[in-house]
Amino acid sequence: MTTLAEAKALVAADDRKDFEFASRGFVATRADPVIARGDGRPANNLAAYDFLAADAPETANPSLWRQAQILTKHGLFTVAERIWQVRGFDVSTVSFIDAGTGWIVVDPLTTVEVARAALELVGEHVAQKPVLAVIYSHSHVDHYGGVGGVTSAADVAAGKVRVIAPEGFLEHAVSENIIVGPAMLRRARFQFGHTLECCAHGEMTSGLGPRPSAGALSLIAPTDLITRTGQEIAVGDVTMVFQLTPGTEAPAEMNFYLPQFRAVFMAENANLTMHNLLPARGALVRDAKAWADYLTESIRLFADKSDVMFAAHGIPRFGREEIVSFLTSHRNAYKFLHDQTIRLMNSGLTAPEIAETLALPKALAKQWFNRGYYGTMSHNSKAIYQRYLGWYDANPASLNPLPPEPAAKRYVAAMGGPAAVMALARAAVDEGELRWAATLLNHVVFDDAENAPARAELAAVYTKLGFDCEAGTWRNIYLTGAQELLHGIAPGPGAGFSPDVLQATTTAMLLDFAAVRVNPDKAAQRAFSLNIEITDRRETHLITVGSGVLIHEEGVADPAAGATVRLKRPDLVMTLIARMPLAPRVESGDIIIEGDASLYAALIDLLEPPTPNFNIVTP
Ligand SMILES: [Zn+2]
């Protein structure tokens, strides 16, 4: 971890190149900084980060402050002849390529409102043209959720607009957040600081981009899939050459090259920060080796013949030499992270020991874009350990330790009670040992969540830790922890699905989501099976319940099942997933049950709603 003194020295020696790249080609920005939603609430407020115009205060790491200044420059920018970007409207960027008779829109942001505002800005200052194609570089929502703001499902269905995405896009777009959606959403609040005020002592970006916009999420299924590197697609008078990079930053992802403009788009594979191998919100762990290897391929394929590089977050880079050196150095950072973590694993170090030891060589670490603003060397090395060896460090003491609450009670008692532990924590704070102070005070809070002075002191320690962090994500995590200790859990956003995402979710995925909500005691009391016929999709699913589990099989029907339920997909969603009353739908004839009419109600009764606001910083 960087010390504050190091961060200050780095900022003082900054050559300001990134600031120049961030403002190059600026055309204009919105007159009204607020992008409104239909209900009047803001989707985003571009003025929210105006406080960053000042010098870094004591409440912020100067290196993160610098990063936030660059990431929050907002407006329309000329990237190259016939290529524009709108940046600062969302955590991601949206790019517009002039294909002669219309636009190719690359990665239409997170929500419909901000995507529409970006297209309007382009229309106002460059040209009003129809959208001919949309490209989703990968399966994360900040790269497709706003598609409804730049085109419509009807225009896509009519063949007026092509939607181009990497193979596997739709499955991953839908599946990544569904099965552990409730837990991920709760944890994401910490990573992005969703409940923090946007200010010099609060949220100041995630280190990747400004705060994600809030608004309507949309999804239109791709019409054209990229299935191999080297595949070419022409839209209007523009030809794109694609590079598939599955299993890098996202399970389905791709870069592309524009030969006639000597421009390369690097998706989210090359950023203005070390990215996450495992985001703090939680995810399946990513593959650092694949990431580095695909960057090696990108360098081989594109770097030498590119005069401009643009990406799905951050800022473009200009000049062939700059692009070669950036991609090479950035690739080296992931390669070093991967290889050296494994070298240390093979020499017997455990994950926290590796995280404490591992640092990029100076030549890589001094490059701003390799620094840990979003991912960090610390938690990324732990992710690599997890990917190859899992959670267990092979020490028998770690095999079956007490959970946090009983462990805390025994630690606090062993150390002489809460007052004695708090005195130790204060001494640790005085010595600048904030991490140890946090460990001590966390035990006191987990011993007794009602101990208000301990909560306040732990909140103060988290706040100080947060202010010092170079990583935006870590800052948000500590400050959100402090907020919850002092004020309790703010009511979070509901885990509502967007209608488009729900439509694209397969019935099998929905039944997986149902199965992970089963109350095991209820499902152990009674064994039964039923056939589900989805009449509007011509699907049959056999559901078998018993021994505490729900099994589902697609395309299977059992004549001996206790009942057969015939219904349309929306009725399955409303009754089984959203728990709307069943009786009216049966009475209206929309749901027809043959056989034991009680079994479908029994199935619904098995499922528990998730607990979206669970405790994190308290027991
Ligand atoms: Zn993204």
Image (cartoon, helix red, strand yellow):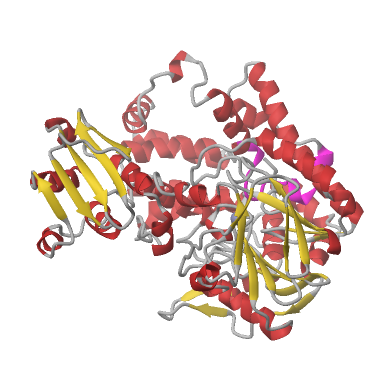
Q: Residue furthest right?
A: 321
**In this picture, which residue range is highlighted in magenta?**
362-378
Q: Is residue 28 above or below residue 408?
A: below
The spot of residue 117 in percent (x, y) is 59, 78
Q: Is residue 72 above or below residue 454?
A: below
Query: Image point 12% across, 33% down: which residue?
Result: 526
Query: Image point 75% across, 39% down: which residue?
Result: 333
Indicate whether residue 371 is drawn in magenta.
yes
Q: Is residue 53 above or below residue 124?
A: above
Of residues 45 and 109, the one nearer the viewer is: 109
Examine the image and state in which quarter residue 440 appears: top left
Q: In the shown orientation, is residue 173 left or right of residue 200?
A: left
The spot of residue 142 in percent (x, y) is 56, 59
Quadrant, the N terminus: top right
The spot of residue 242 in percent (x, y) is 73, 51
Q: In the shown orientation, is residue 536 left or right of residue 350?
A: left
Does the image show residue 517?
A: no
Query: Image point 39% across, 33% down: which residue?
Result: 420
Of residues 500 and 394, the one nearer the viewer is: 500
Of residues 263 and 364, the one nearer the viewer is: 263
